[in-house]
Image (tube, coloured by chain):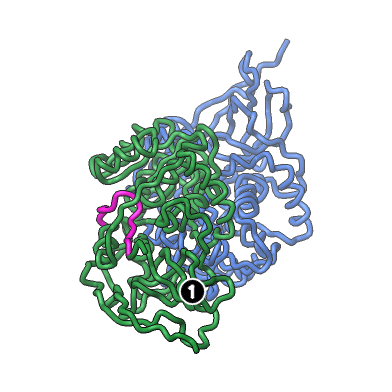
Chain colours: A green, B blue
Amino acid sequence: MEVVEEEVSNKQIILKEYVSGFPKESDMVVKTGTIRLQLPEGSKNAILVKNLYLSCDPAMRGRMRKTEDSYVESFTPGSPIIGYGVARVLDSGHPNFKKGDLVWGMTGWEEYSVIKAPESVFKIQNTNVPLSYYIGILGMPGMTAYAGFYELCSPKQGEYVFISAASGAVGQLVGQFAKLSGCYVVGSAGTKEKVDLLKNKFGFDEAFNYKEEVLEAALKRYFPNGIDIYFENVGGKMLDAVLLNMRLRGRIAVCGMISQYNLEQPEGVHNLFCLITKRVRMEGFIVFDYYHMYPKFLDMILPHIKEGKITYVEDIAEGLESAPAALIGLFAGHNVGKQVVVVARE
Amino acid sequence: MEVVEEEVSNKQIILKEYVSGFPKESDMVVKTGTIRLQLPEGSKNAILVKNLYLSCDPAMRGRMRKTEDSYVESFTPGSPIIGYGVARVLDSGHPNFKKGDLVWGMTGWEEYSVIKAPESVFKIQNTNVPLSYYIGILGMPGMTAYAGFYELCSPKQGEYVFISAASGAVGQLVGQFAKLSGCYVVGSAGTKEKVDLLKNKFGFDEAFNYKEEVLEAALKRYFPNGIDIYFENVGGKMLDAVLLNMRLRGRIAVCGMISQYNLEQPEGVHNLFCLITKRVRMEGFIVFDYYHMYPKFLDMILPHIKEGKITYVEDIAEGLESAPAALIGLFAGHNVGKQVVVVARE
């Protein structure tokens, strides 16, 4: 006779309504339901997981508004927030996963989730690193930095690289990749603490606080010969200042535009004519398109982590209840490094 | 004893002062000087030419203002306007050119010019076509269309192509190249006459008058599946509307932004986030970088012209005195097709 698991409580972070303008903690609510720790009969291909670490990513802002035309679906008001997480498989109806597996991929903001189509979930093989790394350096942000920098920017030794939001989940890695490629690297961030991290922890050649500078002049000072590669995370005024400082045949990888996500109407960018005068290539990308390179990426990055050649800073929020504040904090720059939420350490 | 040529009169179009805002005819003045139709002793490498056809190009607007940071030098107030022209060599101190040669390249807006460094001047070999073609379809605009479309846009059969300022010197060719590549092609222009030309003369699938449309809606109507390739000639609001209608992995070749050239401050472009969601590549270019491909371009285009597969419409202004009005007219869209000024038919 099969043992039927009892129901346990399942805390969840629910999106109340679609959000316009700057999101607030009160746009989300903590709700406690129940869940049976066993997939229902006939749950072919689904997996049931216990969530361990959840990721706060800027791109989640887009899913809080109603859109029909985005690259990911909107969240469903009344349902849990969806995002990247690290989780333990408790029950599996999918041939690729078995009970006990550790995985990372899209999951719910709750203690336990049923992932109905786990085809895009990755099994974690290497556990000699902090598991939270799989929503950071070894997960989506790591792949984003890797694909955006190497595939779109084609870096060459000695080139001049600028990174905005440089201490964030992606930026800190792009800077370290650029140093490994023999580039000169400057980053911008929004506090003294972050600027110090860039210079002293991540090995950037220079860093500055964008809140304390006239952007165009600061870039001219740090890049008297111009910028070969700009890794774009913020958009708006920063992009305008960068355009004026690009170098002949420069490349701009457009990864994100966090400064614009909470505006009703995006700011105008005025200096696009520089694309012509400097023959600049500006290209947007989404990490989804590069996940086939994930094994190659791991082969590259795991030895670097082991040898201490690449480091990663996380900002850890404890407990699922802390997740709404952690997510909102991203847009005010409260996080120092990759914003992680710990749901359970098992 | 060497024959010393007598001086002849040499009419010139002089830029009076640097221009801000919308240029006016009165920013230029016709002046008549004299010139001896013989290079002075020791004019090593120079050539003396009689100008036959002069070109009015939107990019000349940039040279009317004082800039230190552009890709071409500013004009010199008090001196003749500089631009592309077709000319006959009257005297040569350069080993590559001899008296009687026909050439095209940078020359002065005057009857006779001394070209001091003719290294970038092309000798005209094929005279079975109208000579004015060498400042149009067989000159800089032709090479611009060729390089921008084939090199930057990598067109594939069946792709959806949009061209702004589509009846202009460059646009009319891009559209015909796109049709030869098996693409679906739509162009925008600013009068009914031009729209008719696009559809009836150049074989565009569709065309519209941008002054009579809500741009975003018009593009959605003509491109229900989105735009694969945008050949950008105008910038500003048109670019914003296009960004909202781009297709996954679309390409934007940024050739020019004529709508912005006479503004004190360029308009803001708001929809750059679409570069990310649609993974769009946007790249600026300048024809200078592609002139090494000129022989290959001629091999391609001359047979097409001969066989009537490609056609070219010119707007001919008679006489050097008509040049200032012809140039200013570009920015109001007065020209229908490539704007040419005839200085002399020999």
Residue visible at 52% across and 37% down in the picture: A181
Quadrant including the C terminus of chain B: top right
From the top left corner, tell me how far across and down residue B49 is, in percent: 64, 31
From the top left corner, tell me how far across and down residue B338 is, in percent: 58, 53
The vertical placement of A122 against A283, above or below, is below
Left or right? Give the position of A89 relative to B139.
left
Residue visible at 55% across and 74% down in the picture: B225
Count the labels in the image.
1
Q: Mark 1 points at which residue?
A: B220
* Outermost residue to the top: B1
Q: Does the magenta stretch include residue B153?
A: no
Left or right? Give the position of A42 relative to A265.
right
- Magenta residues span A332-343
Where residue B89 sits, quadrant-wise, is top right
B186 and A72: which one is in front?
A72
> Counting other residues with Cα less than 10 Å from the Cα at mark 1, is it few (<14), some (14-19), or many (20 or more)?
some
A117 and B143: which one is in front?
A117
* Outermost residue to the front: A1
Q: Residue under mark 1: which chain is it in?
A: B
Q: Does the magenta stretch include residue A335?
A: yes
B35 and A32: which one is in front?
A32
Instruction: Name the secondary structure under disc 1.
Output: helix
From the top left corner, tell me how far across and down residue B119 is, in percent: 64, 29
The vertical placement of B43 against B133, above or below, is above
Left or right? Give the position of B340 relative to B92.
left
Quadrant including the N terminus of chain B: top right
A189 and A274: which one is in front?
A189
Q: Can residue B112 be seen in this view?
A: yes
Where residue B174 sits, quadrant-wise, is bottom right
From the top left corner, tell me how far across and down residue A89 is, in percent: 46, 70
